Image (tube, grey):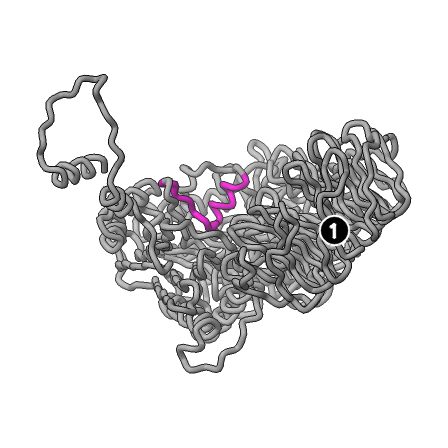
Amino acid sequence: METQIIDGLSSGNEKRQVTGQLASGTNLVNRYLIQEVIGVGGMGSVYRARDLHFPNVVKLVAVKEMINQAPDPLVRQTIVQNFEREANILATLSHPSIPRIYDYFTLENRSYLVLEFVNGKDMESMLAQTEGFISEQQTLSWALELCDVLIFLHGHKPDPIIFRDMKPSNVMINQHNRIMLVDFGIAKPFQSGQKGTMIGTEGYSPPEQYRGEANIQADIYALGATLHHLLTRRDPRLEAPFSFAERPVRKINPSVSIEMEAVINTALQYNASDRFKSVEDFKSALLSAGKKTGLLQHIGPSPAAPVFQATGIKPIWTFQCEDEIRGSAMIYNGTVYAGCYDNNLYALNAATGEFIWKYAAEGGIVSRPAAYEDSIYFGSEDHRVHAVNARSGKVNWTYYTEDRVRSSPRIAEGHLFIGSDDKFLHAVNLVTGRRAWTFDTGAEIRGTPFVANDLVFFGNEAGDFFALDFRGQVKWRYKAKRNVTSSPWVQENSVYFNSMDGYLYCLDARTGFLLWRFRMDKPSIVSPAVAEGLVFTGSADGCIYAVEAKTTREVWRFKTDHQVNGSPVIYRDSLYCGSVDGNLYCLEYRTGRLRWKYATKGPITAAPLAYDDIVYIGSHDHHLYALLA
Amino acid sequence: MLNRIRDFFTTLLGKNKTPEPALDNIVTAPLSEAQLQSIRALSASRYEPMHLLATTAQSVGRQRELNEDCLFSLSSTLAGNTGSPPFGLFIIADGMGGHQYGEVASNTAIRVISSFVMKKFQGALFGMPPTPVEESLQEILQAAIAEAQKAVLREAPGSGTTITAALVLGQQLTIAHIGDSRAYLLYNDQRMEAVTRDHSLVRRLEELGQITAAEAAVHPQRNVLYRALGQGDNLEADITTIPFPMNGYLLLCSDGLWGVVPDADMRRIITEGPTMQRACQNLIAAANAAGGPDNISAVLVQLLG
């Protein structure tokens, strides 16, 4: 019923009072005079004692005690036999890093091992008693010594000895700064299917050791784990098991060399077959890493190179307008419709880019057009919403607001919903072009409203976010700290939008309760996109982010060279997003890996449009591009 | 179901035994309004207002003397001209066996978390002045866990507990979780899925493909946790937000239940009922029937709407 708590702080420092501990001055078997307790192990204490067979000198020994408390007599006998067998093996080993065994004996239910006394501290105590990182050079020197002793053990005939318990508390550093390997499993607690929950794991053992398989590679993993702990000061027993990859050495201790980190990473591979084949290989990898002559070799797998074409991407077609294209394009019936700051709405053949018609409004168009039953609708800075015939470009009706329209329309239930700089949300009857109702929000509305679950969602430049029903009544509202220029995205009862306060918000669509928010480093006007439980967004900090919707965990981020103001779009298994640095990026949306990028000659603030294997994007360089997706 | 409709009509229309009509003389008559209404009533399953139904069950088990589990269940409904979405808070905590004060740790954690959350959301009930809730639901649960951690370190030092806390607001379910107690969702299509991840060594080995689920179930170290409330300096709870399936169930339970009763059996017991309360008691009984090696606790919640 032993419960172990690993708190990383004990060992060496506290000499806990243990029942049955031998008192100082006790004479053991008329030879060993117990001086004091120097450590407490799982099954008994370790004492410093004086060997009285050498009366003229003070010969110090370490006496390791094992109290055998197994209730079953057969089990008790087995423990003693194991103990004796290992003691016999160790008695034959002779190595400068392994303490000599002088004697062993059993008294009633206690067994004792008399060992060479090591005058020094174990690595765990040393870490606890010092501050700051241990130097790579010192770590390397100890690592090489540990490799030597492991090579010695693995080379034992007839059977290799697998140490199986490499960890800082089992490595002592003597007064000559040389390492000594202690605890060869003799005093290991006998585990008999424990009841009750234990907290804490071993931390340094590889996965296969929990299946009962421990080979040479297990010692390699444990040595890698020990070095990782030394260099990062992060105790693996306090972390999730086998999670070293989440704590790269150089991320915690940037002074460590890339080469050393790579060697440790190889030793820490989950699969035994991916690690070094032998400790000799481990040692020569360490030696190579240590050579500072410029012959430094990259050991281990190099980071996956992105599949990346720098040049060679040519657009299928391009179309030049007379001013910046700031808004997104839309496709309807094989025609691409795009608004431009030159006041025109262009209709082009989606496959060839051939010009079909253009319609002149009286103000710049940043709105993304919407289509419904052969008509195209969009807003313009001429204060109006225009409805034009999709095929001919002839106007059906226009609708006046009191100020510039920079929002994009959303069509639902026979109505068009659009915001305006006049601070109102307008609901317009699609057929007649007449106002159904307006809603006063007190600040400009620039995003595209999203319609779902019988509600209209949108934000404004004062940071207010609204959910209205189709009659224009407020269902709920929420206040962010700064402008919500972003268009919201609603998926399965959750509303996502960004604010210039730097947060990506997730609200419950029905009640407006804030479920969670994700912080980015700078303001964001990007409209998020959602796919497969991931929310994609960007920020003026130049990054494109992928955030897991359920847990708010950042899955990846991709850094561009300038602000990301345009919204990302998901198509097939790629994410397309433009940046103010002029590039359109194509990333794998699950991993954030770059597939390709295409450089336009001006900032991109629009969202790309993907359809039928073609990606359309407009740029401030006056062009609309059609690229192969 | 169809039999009931047929019987209903037989009673309504009288036992007129019409002779077998010739096949080409069959006339289909439209249903009357009364008939339509009855059909609608039979198949109506909406509840107004939307609210939560919860029941709990617990046993010390067959082999332990002390109950170190602790559970909490609370749901509240405010409906009327102005109402609130249904509110529910359900927590399970399993104190560490073999430790000192395992039962103090679990009890403390639950007390602190429930009072923290209640003050945030139901302050009006305590006459507290209304302060708008600025933090997100996830942030609130995270703060509640941090408070619980401090309290457990203070009141039961050296001890530990698992904690699985579910906060329901409307149809959004937010769960904060540490350890190996579990939360399951039972959907209308009979699918039952665990929505928490055990912070156990064997789960990690399973995730890495080192052992199979079957091996994990009998592994000698299947009780070893690498994370617990009351242990460790940088405590991180898993916090998730998922939609609560309408008319579906949430089951919170300690390992005294899931470790002993297979998932398929738990699902069957819940769907067999006949009431939620009886089903919850039957879950505990099933665990005891299988030997009851540990304390057993369960909270079963249904969202009705």
> Which amino acid type is marked by label 1?
Gly
Q: Nearer the viewer, residue A526 or B194?
A: A526
Q: Reply above or below: B244 against B215.
A: below
User: Relative to A95, is A161 on the left or the right?
Assistant: left
Q: Nearer the viewer, residue B279 or A149?
A: B279
Using a 10 Å C-alpha cutoff, classify the residue at mark 1 as few (fewer than 14 neighbours), some (14 to 19) or many (20 or more).
many
In the rendered image, which quarter contains the C terminus of chain B?
bottom left
Point 51% across, 51% down: residue: A453
Instruction: Decide whether residue A423 is among the magenta residues.
Output: no
Q: Which residue is mark 1?
A: A379
- Could you tell me residue A419's position as x and y percent? 68, 57
In the rendered image, which quarter contains the N terminus of chain B?
top left
Q: Nearer the viewer, residue A172 or A104?
A: A172
What's drawn in magenta, residue-wise?
Answer: B190-208
Q: Chain of mark 1?
A: A
Occupied quadrant, residue B101: bottom left
Q: Nearer the viewer, residue A283 or A69?
A: A283
- Could you tell me residue A440's position as x and y percent? 64, 66
User: Relative to A563, is A410 on the left or the right?
Assistant: left
